[in-house]
Image: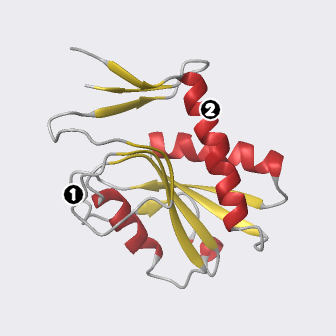
Amino acid sequence: MNQNIILNHLEIDNKIKRIAYQIYETFAEDKEVILAGIASNGYVFAEKIGSILKTISNLEVTLCEVKIDKQNPFKEITTSISREIYLNKSIVLVDDVLNSGTTLIYGVKHFLEIPVKKIKTAVLVDRNHKKFPVKADFKGISLSTSLKEHVHVVFEYNNNHAYLV
């Protein structure tokens, strides 16, 4: 199986920092932002963004893990924090790869079931194969790929990388 590295460790670190600064600029007027990461890699990505945000801003960052069945997004979506915590708050829904948009659109739908202040989306890799009208407000890289190709993001200590198969 051929692996083509599309982002190495340093490039991913730089993209995380840039996205954190963009989020800070967008939410500078707010006191708090909820980083809602799609389990599992989206949550890891959200943690990495959150740790940078905490060092560059005075925003209170709350992490939230969002569990969505990616094969059947109609099933119940659960979060690691209660709805009361993100009520009338600003939210950034985070995932590692935006492929068809299914996961993000259903994730956004879940958060819109109660009043929220603002919702933005962040992804490391945007593949440009959307089935739904969802876009990444903050993205590391846009990548045009064939439908048969797959992007994998690996978060490992000192070895973050993304590759195309």
Identify residue for label 2.
13
Q: Position of residue 138 (x, y in %)?
A: 53, 55
Q: Residues within 10 Å of mark 2 (few under 14, many from 20)?
A: some
- Residue shown at 67% from the left, 66% from the top: 26
x and y percent of residue 162 in the render? 42, 28
User: At 45% from the left edge and 79% from the top edge, which residue is drawn?
Assistant: 112
Q: Which mark is residue 88?
A: none
Residue at the spot 67% in from the left edge and 41% down from the top edge: 17
Residue 88 as seen in the image, left or right of residue 45: right
The residues bearing labels 1 and 2 have C-alpha atoms spaced at a distance of 32 Å
Give the label, 1 or 2, closer to the camera.
Answer: 2
Tell me the amino acid under the disc marked 2.
Asp
Q: Where residue 73 appears, x then y in whole percent?
A: 26, 61
Helix, strand, or loop for circle 1?
loop
Task: Locate residue 81 relative to residue 139 in the image: left or right.
Answer: right
- Of residues 31 and 139, the one nearer the viewer is 139
State which quarter of the image contains the C terminus: top left
Up the image or down, 13 lies above or below 60; here it is above
Quadrant location of the N terminus in the rendered image: top left
Query: Which residue is denoted by mark 1 in the rendering?
Result: 72
Res. 62 visible in picture: yes
Name the one closer to the observer, 29 or 33.
29
- Tell whether 55 sits left or right of 64: right
